[in-house]
Image: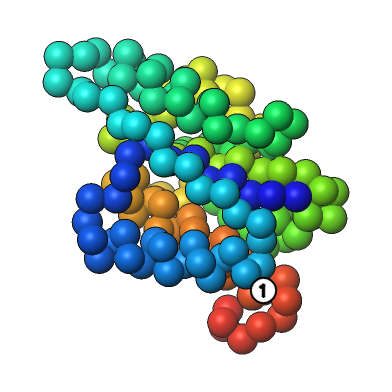
């Protein structure tokens, strides 16, 4: 079992980047973790759907064969931290890879979203993709502490 987090774009804010890297390091203590940043498409002069298609293609290339794809997007299913931990625990028990996808500024293309086995809402609001990445990776870390019965999750 491994967790893949594929995101569009690099983190531009140094403080957010540092927080993300910190939680990625923490999460990797609990789960085999691969993080992939794919190139963000230039929006100027391009139609939104074309931008999303190109970014979606890059994200799709990062999904391991046989992995269950989870599209992180507004309108998806909400899980509390314990439910999310159970999802990851079951994937580990079933030796199933999970691939979490976070789109760019315009979100995920409908093609990528429709192929996802699961749609996960990280919040009821629209989040910048850098913040969405931080929220997701912190919850992956938190899930590890929940599964091991450690005191981080109170």
- The one nearer the camera, 53 or 61, is 61
Can you give x and y, in whole percent of width and height, for residue 4 in the image?
59, 45
Q: Is residue 76 left or right of residue 118?
A: left
Q: Is residue 84 above or below residue 8?
A: below
Q: Name the outermost residue toward the right.
A: 94
- In the image, what residue occupies the spot 34% across and 32% down? 39
Quarter of the C terminus within the rendering:
bottom right
Q: Is residue 3 left or right of residue 105?
A: right
Q: Is residue 75 above or below residue 26?
A: above
- In the image, what residue occupies the spot 54% across and 26% down? 61
- In the image, what residue occupies the spot 57% across and 49% down? 34
| Number of callouts | 1
Q: Name the outermost residue toward the left.
A: 44
**Can the viewer see residue 127?**
no
- In the image, what residue occupies the spot 75% across and 59% down? 89
Q: Quadrant of residue 50?
A: top left
Circle 1 crowding by C-alpha within 10 Å: few under 14, some 14–19, many from 20: many
- The one nearer the camera, 122 or 40, is 40
Q: Which residue is mark 1?
A: 146
Can you give x and y, in whole percent of width and height, for residue 54 in the image?
38, 18
Q: Is residue 126 above or below residue 17?
A: above
- The one nearer the camera, 18 or 43, is 18
Q: Name the colouring of the figure.
A: rainbow
Can you give x and y, in whole percent of width and height, for residue 102 in the image?
44, 40
**Can the viewer see residue 42?**
yes
Q: Is residue 26 left or right of residue 69?
A: left
Circle 1 SS class: helix
- The one nearer the camera, 149 or 58, is 58
Can you give x and y, in whole percent of width and height, for residue 101 in the image?
50, 38
């Amino acid at each position: 079992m491994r967790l893949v987090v594929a995101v569009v774009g690099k983190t531009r804010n140094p403080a957010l980047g540092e927080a993300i890297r910190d939680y990625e390091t923490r999460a990797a203590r609990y789960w085999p973790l691969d993080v992939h940043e794919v190139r963000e498409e230039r929006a100027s002069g391009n139609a939104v759907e074309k931008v999303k298609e190109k970014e979606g293609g890059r994200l799709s290339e990062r999904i391991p064969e046989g992995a269950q794809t989870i599209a992180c997007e507004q309108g998806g299913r909400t899980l509390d931290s314990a439910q999310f931990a159970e999802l990851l625990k079951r994937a580990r028990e079933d030796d199933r890879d999970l691939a979490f996808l976070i789109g760019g500024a315009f979100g995920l293309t409908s093609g990528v979203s429709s192929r996802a086995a699961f749609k996960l809402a990280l919040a009821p609001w629209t989040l910048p993709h850098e913040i969405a990445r931080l929220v997701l990776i912190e919850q992956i870390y938190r899930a590890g502490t929940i599964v091991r019965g450690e005191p981080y999750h109170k």
